[in-house]
Image (tube, grey):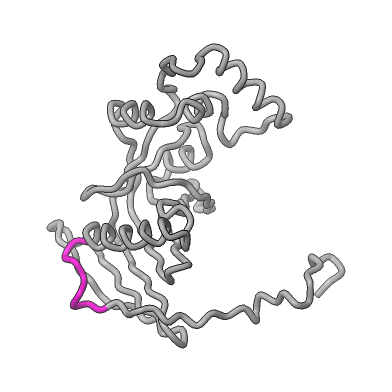
Amino acid sequence: MTDRDPILDPAIDPAAMRKQYRAAGLDEKGLATHPMDQFAGWFEDAARAALHGTLYEPNAMVVSTADAAGRPSSRTVLMKGFDTDGFVFYTNYDSRKAAELSVNPYVSLLFPWHPIARQVIVSGVARRTGRDETAAYFRSRPHGSRLGAWASAQSSVIGSREELEEAYAGLAARYPEGEEVPVPPHWGGYRVAPEAVEFWQGRENRLHDRLRYTARPDGSWHAERLSP
């Protein structure tokens, strides 16, 4: 340690933090043929855990991107849909993540379902959704969230919290509750088409189950077990 290390309560030692996972295993025989079918089953389990209060926001996922020089960045966003073609999220097209995706469309997604000792890791390519799909989702958002998409120039530097709140207040006056808010031209969705999907199940003694699907050129999928 140096005199510049952060001060931490000696009773809180991250190196000593351990949890023995005792969840049921993940077996190749029980895997779905397509990774999105497997994901659907696991997502249902996570959603049920959320209903029972043991897991918060099962659709939260960490999105990792990289710029043209390969420097990565990560943030948590909410998945707003998934289908055979991939996973959908929405964002400001002027944000850092969108700027990075414009020069490097490869992306990693991580669903961290810690309370049920599961993770799903996705590698794939992000492409913008169509404007009709974006508009349909935007109109389903709460009124305040629609105003927020206009008020925030995501990832840009602002002088204060008050500046953001003033922008929101001006929009709320312009578009009161019940009035339609137009879809911002700088806002929309991405669909991440998976190239690999790993299902991680925590097991005892750190002998976790890791089963990964990888896409074949003919559109089928190959599943294989990875060492933990």
Residue 5 falls left or right of residue 82: right
- Per the image, is 70 magenta? no
Q: Main secondary structure of the magenta part?
A: loop
From what the image shows, is residue 86 above or below residue 160? Answer: below
The residue drawn where x is 16% and y is 58% is: 217
Q: Position of residue 87 (x, y in %)?
A: 32, 48
The residue drawn where x is 12% and y is 58% is: 218
Residue 88 falls left or right of residue 71: left
Residue 102 falls left or right of residue 211: right
From what the image shows, is residue 146 above or below residue 65? Answer: above
The residue drawn where x is 45% and y is 51% is: 63
Q: Which residue extends farthest front?
A: 52
- Per the image, is 29 magenta? yes
Instruction: Give the residues drawn in magenta, as a range.
Output: 27-34
Q: Which residue extends farthest bottom?
A: 205
Front-lying residue, 218 or 208: 208
Q: Which residue extends farthest right?
A: 3
Quarter where residue 156 is shown: top right
On-image quarter of the N terminus: bottom right
Q: Position of residue 37 (x, y in %)?
A: 21, 59
